[in-house]
Image (cartoon, helix red, strand yellow):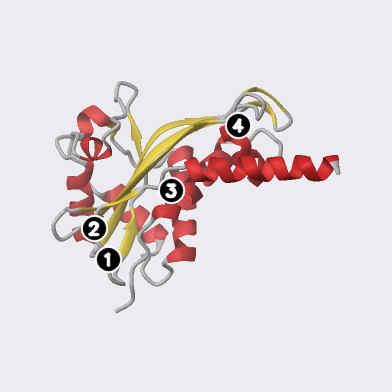
Amino acid sequence: MKTWRYRSLAAAIVLVVFAGILPGKTLAQAPPITQLAVMPFLTAGSSAQQSKELTQTLDCELSGLCTLPGATLTHAEQTVTRQMHEALTERVPDQLLPQQEVTDAFLSLIKRPEETPRDLARRFGQEIKADYVLIGILWRFDQRVGESLSAERPASVAFTTYMVKVADGSLVWEDRFDKTQSALSDNLLNAVLFFKTGVKWLSAEELSNVGVEQVLKSFPVPQRN
């Protein structure tokens, strides 16, 4: 009887937490079936500040916002970009451009410091003939210190995502993820994370994957013509 009560309480906590999660923002009607590219994630510079108003970040100059991409991607950029593409493959498989081709084209593209992420996405989209470009800005990707059962310091990940229409630069969708894992006993908001992934301390890669799945819950799945 006690076990059932505990399970009921746990289920109630999960329901309350899920009810409190705010969805991302879809700013335009879901686009029709078309070509979508996942541009490799950009890494925010150490002096950049994440704005509560997501669209402000989208229109900040790259020189003051991001570490301009070089000839290769960092492990964090590669990881979250891959996770985003794989998750979108399950949702819009017919629209996605091949990720390796998109990444190769992006790395060969000359980045202009005066451009904004929106400008870069439009120019990049025109280059690869995409109709929509998904942009991600990675603010934090801190690894767990310790083991999965006894971490000295938990993983911490934060990123923002946008989808821009290449033709006119309009913002179709935006969302964010910002999470530092803490003990279930410290914060009931961690109930969802612990019940979903098991009672363990996640790696940064595992936490970012949770974040990708969370933000894509609000992704505007295109309507078929």
Element at label 1: loop
Asked whether the residues under the numbered discs 3 and 2 touch, taking CB atoms below 8 Å apart as contact, a structural biologist would say no
Tell me how far mark 3 sits from mark 1, CA to CA.
18 Å
Which mark's residue is nearer the viewer, 4 or 1?
4
Tell me how far mark 4 sits from mark 1, CA to CA.
37 Å
The percent coordinates of residue 153 (x first, y second) are 61, 22
Residue 63: name its quadrant: top left
Q: In the rendered structure, which amino acid carries the disc numbered 4?
A: Leu
Of 11 and 26, nearer the camera is: 11
The residue under the point 28% across, 38% down is 54
The percent coordinates of residue 13 (x first, y second) are 62, 40
Q: Which quarter of the rendering shows the N terminus? A: top right
The percent coordinates of residue 156 (x first, y second) are 52, 30
Disc marking residue 215: 3
The percent coordinates of residue 111 (x first, y second) are 22, 42
Q: In the rendered structure, which amino acid carries the disc numbered 1?
A: Pro
> Which label's residue is closer to the chain start, 3 or 1?
1
Q: In the rendered structure, which amino acid carries the disc numbered 3?
A: Val
According to the picture, the residue beneath numbered tag 4 turns out to be: 188
Q: In the rendered structure, which amino acid carries the disc numbered 2?
A: Ala
According to the picture, the residue beneath numbered tag 1 turns out to be: 31
The residue under the point 19% across, 40% down is 116
> Which label's residue is closer to the chain start, 3 or 2?
2
Asked whether the residues under the numbered discs 3 and 1 touch, taking CB atoms below 8 Å apart as contact, a structural biologist would say no
Tell me how far mark 1 sits from mark 2, CA to CA.
8 Å
